[in-house]
Image: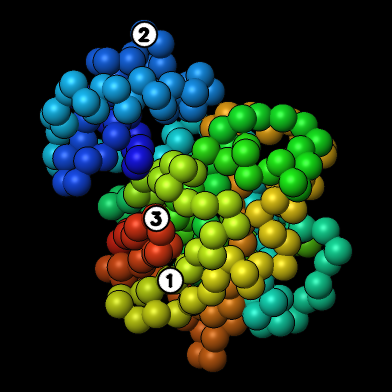
Amino acid sequence: MKLISFNHHHKASYGVVVGDDVLDLTPLLGTQAPDLKTLIAKELFGQVTELLKTHKPNLKFSELDLLPVIPNPGKIICVGLNYGEHVRETGRELTESPALFVRLPSSQVAHGKDIIRPTESHRLDYEGEIAIVIGKGGRKISEADAWNHIVGYACYNDGSIRDWQNHTTQWTAGKNFYQTGAFGPWMVTADEIKPNQTLTLMTRLNGVELQKATTEMMIHSIPRQIAYISTFTPLEAGDVIVTGTPGGVGNKRTPQLFMKPGDVVEIEIDAVGILRNTIKDEA
């Protein structure tokens, strides 16, 4: 199933997408699960399935004020330099372990919302990525068991302010400008995507394909990422791991290509859908 978070009547809600419509789950499960993260933690997907049998969708997807898939994650951990072509274009060396950084929830927007180019820099770059959402938490999760800890998949744009990213060897500033990334449009539950299924990831800017890769091209596999990250921090339901971007980023093109106001950027995962955002200058 496809699950989303959104605002409805000025209140945070969540629901399940059925074609072009949505069943609002907040009035039905709010006492048990007021948000999608709680639904995941309590593993209430069976109840959602039963509700779909007895309740018709009551909202139009196109009319919703969407939120990032998980608006309130405990952690957003991103993996850098995880595709060989991207490592080569950056001139860096392969690392034995995943290169990690974190994003803050305020640095991301939902599908259909404007990604904001800040006044401090116009070097706003795209990075198409596959996001995984943790269902069953744990620490020191083995690679063999890692697939059982994934509840779903979503598209992610790890938008980056390149000059700020390179102010120091630590990337935090350039990866966390307000509303420069995007997370959506929905989470496809893991029962619809087989463990180790090959996923194809694409990034388009104004309709032009700039990035394309498959999960088979990852240096550190998704199970490896989960095992490594959970060694030093317990993973919890609703945590998000953003699994790395392929080669083709704008900063490494000749000439360089940065996103500007009016541009439309799309991140597509073949088994998930398309995350689409327009670029806007900070007011």
Viewer-proximal residue among 262 and 21? 21
Query: Which residue occupies the extreme top position in the image?
Result: 31
Tell me the SS state at disc 1: strand
Q: Which residue is mark 3?
A: 272
Q: Which numbered marker is on residue 203? A: 1
Q: Residue at x 83, y 58 (%)?
A: 97
Secondary structure, mark 3, is loop
Label 2 neighbourhood size at 10 Å, few (<14), some (14-19), many (20+)?
few
Residue 115 as seen in the image, left or right of residue 43: left
Q: Is residue 98 left or right of residue 79?
A: right
Q: Helix or strand or loop: what does disc 2 sit on?
A: loop
Q: Residue at x 55, y 71 (%)?
A: 214
Q: Earlier in the sequence, mark 1 or mark 2?
A: 2
Q: In the current view of this chain or complex, which residue is farthest to the right?
A: 96
- Quadrant hosting residue 71: top left
Residue 98, position as x, y percentages in the image: 77, 58
Q: Amino acid at mark 1?
A: Thr
Front tag of 1 and 2: 2
Q: Nearer the viewer, mark 3 or mark 1?
A: 3
